[in-house]
Image: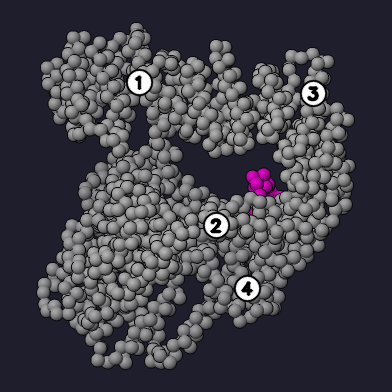
Amino acid sequence: MNKDILDNIKELPQFKLLCKKKSDLLKYFESCNRNEYDEIWMTLHTSLVEYISADNLIYDEEKSTLLFKEENNRQYLLTSILFVSIYLQYLHNKTQKKGITFEEDFQILFCKLIEIQFMLSYKEVRLSFGKCLLTICELNIKENEFTNNVKINLLLYLLWKCCHIEGKGTDITKLKKFKDFCKYINWGISERTTDSFYILCSYTLNLPKFYETSDGKIFLSHVWSQNESIAYHLFNKFVHNTAVLAHNHICHYSEIIYSTWRNCSEDMKETLYTQIEYLVNFSLKCPIKIAARFRDVLSIFHTNKGDKDINRLIFKIYDPVIWRSLMCPNWKIRFNATCIFQLIYPVVDPGIKDINYLEEMEKAYNALLDLSEDKNTYVLQATAKCICYILSELWEIINHDKRMKLIDILINKFLKEKYNECVRVEVVLGFCEMSKNPMIRKIILKIFDRIKYLINDNSLRVRKNFIMLILNLQDYLNDTFSYDIDFNELIKKLTKDFITFNVQSCIKKMSYMKYEYHDKLKNKEMYEYLKLSTNLISYSIWKCDIKEQAMKCINLLNEYPVLMICISKFSTNVNLIDRYKLSSVLFEITNSKLKEENNFIMLNKTNQDIQDKHDKHDKQDKYDKQDKHDKQDKHDKQDKYDKQDKHDKQDKHDKHDKQDKHDKQDKQDKHDKQNKQDKYLMMDKNYNKNVYINNNINIILESDSNLKKRYIRYSTLLICIANFLKPRNEEEIELCYSEEIEEFLKMKFKELYFVESINTIMQPFYFKVLKNIYLDYDNYYMNIHKYSTNQLNNLYTMKNLYLCKTIIIPLFFKWKLLNIYIIEHLKFLNISMECIIYNINKCISNVHSQYYHLNIDKHTFQVIQQNVIELINIHKGYNDNTNNLLSYVKNNNISEHKNNIIIKQNNNNNKNNVNTQNRHIHMSNIMLDYNELKDATINKQKELNCLIFLSLVVKKKKYHNILFKPFPYVIYNIIHKFNNFLLHIFHNISLHNFELPSYFLSAYYKGGNKKKDTENLILLILYNKKEIKLYIHIYVSFFFLFHSYCTHNNILYEWNDLIQNTSKCIEHISNIKFKNEIQLKLYNVTSREHIHNKDEQHNKIKWANYTSSIIYLITYFLDMVEYTIGMKMISIDELDINIMTYNLFLFYKCYQIVCDTEKEIKLIYFTVWYRIYSFIICMLNLGYFEKKTQIKLAVLNTFFIFTYEFVPNIYIENFMKKFACIIKEKDIFQNFLSNFKNNSEVLNYMSNNQRSKIQQVIDKIMFQKEKIKHKT
């Protein structure tokens, strides 16, 4: 047996087979003696050395990676590690009280593995070997030099794993668990393990995911406190990073240094003291902005100065330097020292006696007085802030006379600084902070008359902050304070300031643009002004009874509707109860006003009126051209509508000699198409906010300006009511569910009002109010719930999409009903996906325009049902119903076949009938009955409804939990199946050269094999643009959002295969070859002749549908390409943009040849052209042109060839400008543009108009570049 093992180890195939028989190998290890182990390890070591010799390795200097030349060498190394891990598992299973001692040969082998895995750049090698390291450290082993080395390498492995891009929080937890292994490291000695440990530890300071976690902080502080050598290594990295770190991350650094100082040994105290002393010096002597960062690092010591040890540390470090720094001639050091002095005041030795303590307090107080006499503006600003902070925090321990003296300095000195705006601003802000201290408010109230002149200060910032002080005092003090203030004057002043601020911001933004500074201005200041103004205005509204409040709101709304909306949205000084009362009054007024005679039209049902007006408008516009059509019978018109498109295209050239009739027929087609577009709004064009609603409203309101004014008034009023009803925080949300509030809402906001608004122009605004009413759906079940359900079930009509997205879906989410609809639609989408996969292998003869994949017969249903059962079997355990279903399958002998399922039934057995019923109950979780699926027409409506609904739901993050949680394996199944569908389609298209029938390209074609023209057509399943767009949108959204959801919730699925399939899809698209490629590029559409043969015309229609479907599949698949590359799942260097864009444009050329409608040709052209435009820009931003730029610029040649003369110049110019800005190798790009006029490979395929258009744009770009050069 031992000889067989040794022979198997030498050869890779036998070695891999040996390791697969894990149970046999474990039994063999039990029977081995020590000599046999020695032979195994020596043999394995010898073979391993041969496989990993230097001759078998290759080093890539560009990527700095060491790899094997051949895959077999890597596989042997992985198999060797697996073999060792099985042996370690045997030792782990073997219970031993005594410590384990490894054989010497095993130690030699394992050290060799440590060495080679450390050198190689294979992630899987390190991961598999890391498991061996973990297993050894969990064994009861005797400590020796070997085990110490293993423990150090375990730390290195865990550190590497934490630093890896795929590192997780569990890895950091394991690292903290083994932190005591640090004692085995040879600190300060330069060797491989020590140097690597230093580098990896310092690298963790660059990773927020590491130092933000508590385990990461504990590990770093533990390592820091081990030895002076590592402490200074980490400190140097710590200091360097602090200077460039984001401000919100500095607090984590602060916690690390604090924890290190707290937990270090006495031997390391002095080292930490020295390092903190360095930080103090940095906070004093660095430039102001950098010093502020180091103050933030030290802030944790300043805020905990109540602790005796910390207070002693602060005094020991700061006392020698702070007083000298406060008197330094350099104003920047004085500024930094003042900022620190504010935090450590009064800097008194905690062990000092009472008499000396008072002397030290006096010294600190005198230092404040000296600082107040400083001549530097910035030091005065810091002093003002320092005094305000000290008064606010230490009010009780400062003598009364000294307090008043400091306040007097603030009022009579700092607020009198006419030319130092920043000083006055700091004082006012300081008063705002001091007003939060109850003991200081009365003092501020007494001195208010002395500072109220600041409302007229020259500085806009002073005035704004003073108004903030007034609002704070109003909140904290009694109502009598507001009687002494003229709020109308404040409102006027603030309105003027708000306008001034906006003008200044615009000027500032324009100056940024002038210098090509592209950072956006923050809107925080603007929001503060808006919030202040709304609160000020609302003071004048709320100080009266409820009726007067409502009247003031309506009066303000009539004059300034937008301002009233801002007040309802941003005001924070009105509690929820008062807002609800006001809302109920305003709602009652709105309902009564809308029922008045002159406003009643706004509550009229508008759908029928709008349809009549549409018909009347169309008839009037085309009356002269369609006289014959208008006299036709309605039934004939309906029949014609159903078959019109196919009939027109077949008979078009047969009626060529009857031109008049042909013209009328063509106009009839346009008319029918227009009616259809009016009836079903296109999703991709009219999906913008309120498009459908606005179309209806404009028809009614355009002719009546008074009605339009009233419409604006009452719609704005309803928006304000909705804003008032919306809770502002979690406390208000809890209050909304109280019994008193619910009873109040039931009484004031009855269902009848909302029902009356349905199908009226006021409906969106009434439903916006309904959305913010926190009542259960039981209160609106009779009508609103039914109406909303009907709207969600009729999304396929493309009406009320915006209403469903913004109102009904959030409403159902609040009512906790959305999960029902999500599950139902997921079930149907899963069935639809199963049907697509079932049909992709059908024969070519099924390629026709009437094909539909959801024509489900009983056989198809059985196959789908079988697939669902298999799906549950594979992913069992996700819900309780799965186990019941599986037990039913087992107990009732369900025979599973490839294409059908046979259920053995016993009609005489009642128990079996019960089980069958239970089966349907369980299967209904992710399956529908056959009776629900047998009607293809209804299936088509359900499919479109399902796609639209899920595309709306997946966009909102708050719905993801109820979307992904119930049946995660169904989501994965949908992603997996559609991924395979795309791979199948693109693979089959690339198998043969794409060839159009010859008679489309040449008028001299006479005869030929018609069957051969269509033999390479494949069944695409999806032919409709809308369906293709929605399917791919849902697929891409599910792929990335569900992937993130699984990662966050530790749900394991296989994603690598899906990513590889995506790479293969890209490869297949690039591999598509076109027969007669040159003819396609040079084909002139204007010179073609009409085809009169009916069969050929019908064939042309089929080819147009086929090519357009391929175009849409590739066009929308580019979304997946962008996401996978953007998420770094696929390397951008593997992509050849030029071939992809070239093939997509050639498909367009094919469509251009077989399509007769110029409008449709242009529509497809702009769809393709603009998608390629955005795709290339996306790849440019992702760094596609960073390497081999000259080769990759070939994509521009393709882009120019297919950029026709009717493309607006502005798009081409923007495209070229973005190229010029982002591409790094400017000279190569400049030479490319300069030589365009000599590029015969491109110019030979372009028309004269194209050449001149492109050259004109290039000349303009070049001229602008030259102009900039001359200026500089």
Structural crowding at the residue carrying mark 1, measured as other residues with C-alpha within 10 Å and reported as few (<14), some (14–19) or many (≥20):
few
**Residue 730 within the segment the image draws in magenta:** yes
What distance separates the C-alpha of mark 4 from that of mark 2? 48 Å
Q: Residue 363 shows which numbered tag?
A: 3
Q: Quadrant of the N terminus?
A: top left
139 relative to 771, above or below: above
Q: Residue 1117 shows which numbered tag?
A: none
Q: Earlier in the sequence, mark 2 or mark 1?
A: 1
What distance separates the C-alpha of mark 2 from that of mark 1? 52 Å
What distance separates the C-alpha of mark 1 from that of mark 4? 81 Å
What distance separates the C-alpha of mark 2 from that of mark 3? 51 Å
SS type, badge 1: helix
1241 displayed left or right of 310 = left
Q: Where is residue 681 shown, x and y percent of the image?
A: 45, 71
Are the residues flagged by discs 2 and 1 in contact, CB closer than 8 Å?
Answer: no
Region in magenta? 724-741
Are the residues flagged by discs 3 and 1 in contact, CB closer than 8 Å?
Answer: no
Q: Residue at x 37, y 73 (%)?
A: 1206
Q: In this figure, which residue is indicated by the disc labeled 2?
A: 513
SS type, badge 4: helix
